[in-house]
Amino acid sequence: MSESQVTVHLQQQQDYRFQIEFGATVPDLIGDEPPPLGGGAGPSPVQLLAAAVGNCLTDSLLFALRKYKQAPEPLAGDVTAEVGRNAEGRLRVLGMLAVLRLGVPAAQLQHLDRALSQFEAFCTVTQSVSAGIPVEVQVFDVEGTRLK
């Protein structure tokens, strides 16, 4: 059973460029395919998907650490989406790599292992996307030490 619904409205402006309306107080966004198909006037659907996965993961990691009253800020991350052809020759997102970075050394954070072991499970978008697209998640501290 659905707990809530999220609706966005898309309005074509020209060719593959769409105004994306989120409603209420959230600013509109322009989405567009890159050349030669579109004009590249905004993020592509693949970029928006990667942004959604990265945003959800960093939010979830922040929430997990704050639950233990820890301050990992500022968090940062990069999400790389591999686009290629499937068995039918159609372009698809074949996989994603999310690399998250804490803004502090790992030694400054208590309960880090517990937070790292559970934050992905609470990420709504990534858990939904990973049902069809493999998503690898790596976490590093500010000193470059890989934690996950």
Image (tube, helix red, strand yellow):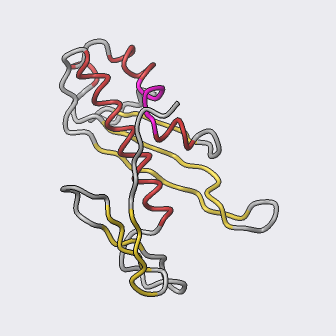
Q: Is residue 19 above or below residue 144?
A: below
At horizontal 55% and vertical 44% (from top left) the residue drawn is 129
Q: Is residue 93 above or below residue 42?
A: above
Instruction: Please provide percent x and percent y for residue 123.
Output: 43, 33
Instruction: Please provide percent x and percent y for residue 1.
Output: 53, 30
Q: Is residue 109 above or below residue 91?
A: above
Can you tell which quarter of the image residue 19 is in?
bottom left
Instruction: Please provide percent x and percent y for residue 52.
Output: 41, 50
Q: Is residue 94 above or below residue 31?
A: above
- Residue 19 sits inside the magenta stretch: no
Foreground residue among 143 and 9: 9
Foreground residue among 28 and 138: 28
At horizontal 31% and vertical 32% (from top left) the residue drawn is 141
> From this viewpoint, which residue is outermost toward the front?
1
- Residue 123 sits inside the magenta stretch: yes
Is residue 90 rendered to the left or right of residue 52? Answer: right
Q: Main secondary structure of the magenta part?
A: helix
Identify the magenta region.
119-124
Can you tell which quarter of the image residue 65 is in?
top left
Instruction: Please provide percent x and percent y for residue 61.
Output: 34, 30
Is residue 63 rendered to the left or right of residue 8? Answer: left
Count of marks placed on residues: 0
At horizontal 43% and vertical 79% (from top left) the residue drawn is 12
Foreground residue among 84 and 128: 128
Foreground residue among 45 and 69: 45
At horizontal 23% and vertical 22% (from top left) the residue drawn is 66
